[in-house]
Amino acid sequence: MLDFDLMLKNFISIVSYLPVTIKLTVGALLIAFPVSFFFAFTQIRKIPIISLLVRVYLSAIRGTPILLQMFTIYALIPLWINSAFTSMGKEIDIYSVDPIWYAYIAISLSATAFLTEAIRSAILSVDKGQMEAGYMVGLSKWQVYKDIIIPQAMTVAIPIMGNVIVDVIKSTSLAFTMSVTEIMGRAKIIGGMSTKYLEMYLDAFFVYVIFIIVVEFILKRVEKSLTKYRKAN
């Protein structure tokens, strides 16, 4: 039998770590979005060497599990930084760095790969005549992209971006493997202390479900507001 009293007692404790999950999600997306736009443009413009490196990166990230990426980053980055400072004759306690920074990097790497493809395909879906029309009225390339191409592309990309954002939220549940205590990490800790893992994982399940429902509602509102002009046409 499930211990519902224990579930109710610890539900608030697990919910109290929701801000950490939100922090991880927002932090990773703040890194991923600008990098994704840059990567998408390198693919569209086919910039020599950079475009090839981006394709290799996209293939590597999409072809490996995010958990493996997390373990690799958590192990390699401190080692590289420590070696770099040691070679310069300087000492640094790299292991005192908050592990949430490694989580930001790992989660954003995965998000960047999928957002890049979403943005690239969305931009390419905009009629090329839109760009030519912008040039004809005297707009620069930057102005054409900023005022004409990207706003239209976002209406196409927002549903896919919404899926990526939800995937990022779910990916944060793996951050506890990098010593970051978030919703899943807290559930695991309480489960270990009480030996009631199932109850605590169910608590975490309900927290994620409620949070993602709220996020999806917000994303639907954003999508609706961005597509208003289409309905007007």
Image (cartoon, rainbow, N blue to C red):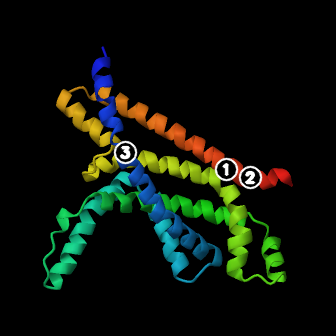
Amino acid residing under circle 3: Ser
For this rendering, which residue is in front, 119 or 154? 154
Q: Look at discs 1 and 3 and give the one toward the viewer.
A: 1
Which residue corresponds to mark 2?
227
Residue 150 lies, with reference to residue 183, above or below; the image says below
Amino acid residing under circle 2: Thr
The label number, if any, that marks residue 223 in the structure image: 1
Q: Quadrant of residue 45?
A: bottom right
Q: Report whether 218 appears left or right of 143.
A: left
Q: Report whether 175 appears left or right of 161.
A: left
**Do residues under tags 1 and 2 come within 8 Å of each other at their CB atoms?**
yes
For this rendering, which residue is in front, 232 or 167? 232
Q: Report whether 137 appears left or right of 202.
A: right
Q: Report whether 151 appears left or right of 161.
A: right
Residue drawn 81% across the image and 78% down it: 132
For this rendering, which residue is in front, 130 or 217? 217
| x and y percentages locating residue 16 in the rendered image | 33, 39
Q: Look at discs 3 and 2 and give the one toward the viewer.
A: 2
Residue 228 visible in image: yes
Q: Secondary structure at mark 1?
A: helix
Residue drawn 53% across the image and 58% down it: 114
